[in-house]
Image: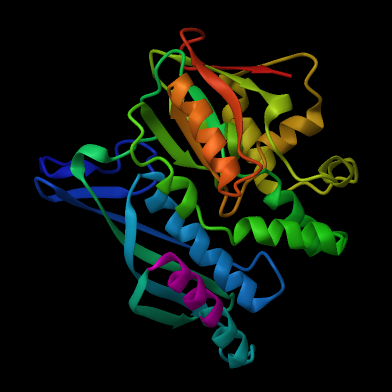
Amino acid sequence: MSSDPKLIVGMEHAEDAGVYQLRDDLAIIQTVDFFTPIVDDPYTFGQIAVTNALSDVYAMGGKPLTAMNIVCFPIKTMPVHILRDILRGGMDKMHEAGVLLVGGHSVEDNELKYGLSVTGVIHPDKVLLNRGGQVGDRMILTKPLGTGIVSTAVKAGVADEALQARSARCMTTLNKQAAELLEGLSTVHACTDITGFGFLGHACEMIEEANVGMRVYASRVPYFPGLKKLLDDMIIPGGTARNRRHREPQVNIDPGCPDWMMDILFDPQTAGGLLIVLGAAEAEELLRKMHGAGIEEAAIVGEITAEPKGKIDLVF
């Protein structure tokens, strides 16, 4: 743990980014993320990578300002136009977000990777952490689940074009608008974005070692159509099993909840939605605003409870 009193968020907990106070009214948010391609189209991959990297800043309640490219590229075996398309996709998404590219670094690597380091700003009193939910709070998920399953299906050559397109649209949709709709609300107590640990993995982080519990209504959680058939055909990301092994002991599973639903709830996401914890009255108001703004699949998927402390009751 750092002894610097200006470090607001560091490495002590599994937060989405680091936050350091510069002035009484200003702090910087810093995050970094990069990964291998999960779609075939280079331009789309660039957009997804940027959407994913910026999401950590939105999840903290901040505004991303600048970014630096991180590139690993097999220059001897891959045409350079692929890299140009990736960077063009990334640049277009940064422009959409109002983020300025200020530099970057590239290395030669046998495996292609792309992402960003991102710097954002926030008022020190308005930082959103991934814990802090209060009994009675509701939980809003802003995007459907299933990007990991679809990406695995793409690699296996069994994903239909409509499902691929829907997943790509989801992964290239910035969390910017959803985060901006939180401004002015007084009872937002916690927020995170859903990424590699899956929905339930990140939900577990929100109440781990806390004096509250959580109830999740599995039937209300949005997910892409067609996932059950893919799961029945054993199209399951490797990360799903790891997520389940790590976090299922923290979840009291409804006996009526089918195993395929658990695979969806633990599906590792890329550029997933925000999971927002806030007061019940403002949750209903926020949901109406989101639906009106075109975030149509946002849903209230659970609530913070007094018991079981540090665990999730999963209701189907």
Q: Is residue 114 left or right of residue 10?
A: right
Q: Residue at x 47, y 77 (%)?
A: 91
Q: Is residue 123 above or below residue 316?
A: below
What residue occupies the far front of the structure in this picture?
292
Q: Is residue 183 above or below residue 76?
A: above
- Give percent across and percent down for residue 192: 45, 40
Q: Is residue 20 above or below residue 106?
A: above
Q: Residue at x 64, y 88 (%)?
A: 78
Figure disc tally:
0
What residue occupies the far top of the structure in this picture?
307
Q: Is residue 270 left or right of residue 240?
A: left
Q: State which quarter of the image contains the N terminus.
A: top left
- Give percent across and percent down for residue 44: 63, 72
On the question of residue 239 being in view, the answer is yes
Quadrant of residue 145 within the rendered picture: top right
- Give percent across and percent down for residue 277: 45, 29
From the viewer's side, name the closer residue of 243 and 117: 117
Q: How is the image coloured?
A: rainbow
From the viewer's side, name the closer residue of 223 and 117: 223
Q: Is residue 143 left or right of residue 62?
A: right
Quadrant of residue 74 within the rendered picture: bottom right
- Give percent across and percent down for residue 94: 44, 70
Q: Is residue 87 above or below residue 22?
A: below
Q: Is residue 73 magenta?
A: no
From the viewer's side, name the closer residue of 271 and 297: 297
Q: Residue at x 16, y 51 (%)?
A: 26
Q: Is residue 92 magenta?
A: yes
On the question of residue 131 being in view, the answer is no
Secondary structure mostly seen in the magenta stretch: helix
Q: Which residues are magenta?
A: 88-98
From the viewer's side, name the closer residue of 170 and 113: 170
Q: Is residue 262 left or right of residue 287?
A: right
